[in-house]
Image: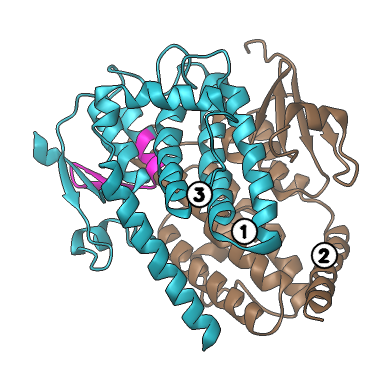
Chain colours: A brown, B cyan
Amino acid sequence: MADQGEVKLLKTWSSLFGLRVVWALKLKGIPYESVDEDLTNKSDLLLQYNPVHTKVPVLIHNGKPICESLVILEYIDETWSQNPPSLLPQDPIQRASARFWAKFMDEKALPSMWQAFTKKGREQEEGLASIAEKLKLLEAELEGKKFFGGEEIGIPDFALGWLVNLVPVFEEILGLKIVDEERHPSLSEWSRRISDIRVIEESWPPRDKLVTKWAAIRDHFLATARASSG
Amino acid sequence: MAKEIKLLGTWASPFSHRIELALKLKGLQFQYLEEDLSNKSQLLLQSNPVHKKIPVLIHNGNPISESLLIMEYIDETWQHQNPLLPKDPYGRAAARFWAKFIDEKVLWTAFKAYNDKGKEQEDAIEEFSQQLKFLEEELKGKEYFGGERFGFVDIASFFILQFLRVLQEVKEAELMTEEKYPVLFEWMEKLQGNEVVAGCLPPREKHVAYVRARRAAAEEAASKTKAA
């Protein structure tokens, strides 16, 4: 195997964006050093290597930083192109489609989920309707395929990973079902398939810690909303 | 040959301008179809059912949506002439990072900085100024964002910044000035002086009049909603 160089990943214990990069590195067999940040007290390293956003994840390869999880995934795929699996298909049309859906998951599905989770009343209902609509589209896109890219796991699957481990946490906190077997047979099957992948399953943050963390986040948002409405 | 590549766009959209330029830089013949966004064509609705937005590139019947993704597709499919992205993975990652920054941060902050009121506007103005500083720093010491030749980030950012200058004129604001951002302004002038690039820009007065009318309509609609 060619010399990897030094690979460091700045993330947090629970960051869903950081997890994507962990999966890519582990699936491709790339050794790396992991640094968990405390975002209430950002390290000098983080501020130095991501001055524009001061966010995780940041991949540092031979001292050079790469930021933004989807950008990092493509960087990993291009730099370690000899290591299977390929994270994007070879054909340009299919690549464009994979990127399109990854973008959709981050720019449409996740914000809808966020709204459904951090609001109540009418705003929450709107969020729930929105995520339901996005899931319908994803269900249709996935139908008949093992993964979003086809036979092999890839970037759009990583982008939707939060559906597998975080949505059940949200469902528990909200007391609502967001994904179910009846409306989402393909997504449910896909979720099981994702969980069956050992490196993915081993990297899930502990569920009880996630429930505590996210319940506190929801409480915080609801309290802030109450305060600002006077 | 021209039938193989179709571009669905609008004359006023900076996202559409990006694709026009990318295709021209690659020396490609294409059919341009102007969309009326108040009356979207069947072709648009079929080609981009998820977002129903322009631009859409249709190549050999295959539709591709989202302007930055279309640019990547064009670069991957027609690799030999005028590469838009560098070859090395780090350079490619940097280009994707900055293009994303323009689309996900700069554009939206700028809208708030120009259009909002009160504290929200003040905060946005502050943030927009910081974002432009980052761009200024990134460009310093280089001919273009892409280095010696202009490329992905130049194409992504030029039309957006030109659009924001139009919005700035409509709002009679002074957030982007040559004084504050000399490097950015010199770069914009350089690109405006390039015939192929300038050919993708709409006539300035027409663009200003159009944005002015759209802002007036948006503000009227917003005040009606408030009054109701």
In this view, A227 is above or below A200: below
Looking at the rendering, in which quadrant would you find the N terminus of chain A? Answer: top right
Looking at the rendered image, the disc whose residue lies closer to the viewer, 3 or 1, is: 3
Looking at the rendering, in which quadrant would you find the C terminus of chain A? Answer: bottom right
User: Which element carries disc 3, helix, strand or loop?
Assistant: helix
Mark closer to the chain start, 2 or 1: 1
Q: Gap between marks 2 and 1, in whole Å?
A: 27 Å
Residue at the right extreme? A41
Q: Chain of mark 3?
A: A
Q: List x then y, in percent, for residue B226.
A: 55, 82
Is A116 in the magenta?
no
User: Which element carries disc 1, helix, strand or loop?
Assistant: helix
Looking at the rendered image, the disc whose residue lies closer to the viewer, 2 or 1, is: 2
Residue at image mark 3: A103
Give the residue drawn at x 35%, y 20%. B83
Give the residue drawn at x 40%, y 24%. B189
Give the residue drawn at x 52%, y 70%. A184
Q: List x then y, in percent, for residue B92.
A: 51, 24
Q: Gap between marks 2 and 3, in whole Å?
A: 25 Å
User: Which element carries disc 2, helix, strand or loop?
Assistant: helix
Q: Is A20 displayed left or right of B25 in the figure? A: right
Q: For this rendering, which residue is in front, A3 or A16?
A: A16
Kindly identify the amino acid type of the residue bearing the numbered disc 2: Ile
Residue at image mark 2: A217
Kindly identify the amino acid type of the residue bearing the numbered disc 3: Lys
Mark closer to the chain start, 3 or 1: 3
Q: Chain of mark 2?
A: A
Asked whether disc 2 touches disc 3, contact meaning CB atoms under 8 Å apart, the reply is no
Residue at image mark 1: A192
Q: Which residues are magenta?
A: B55-71
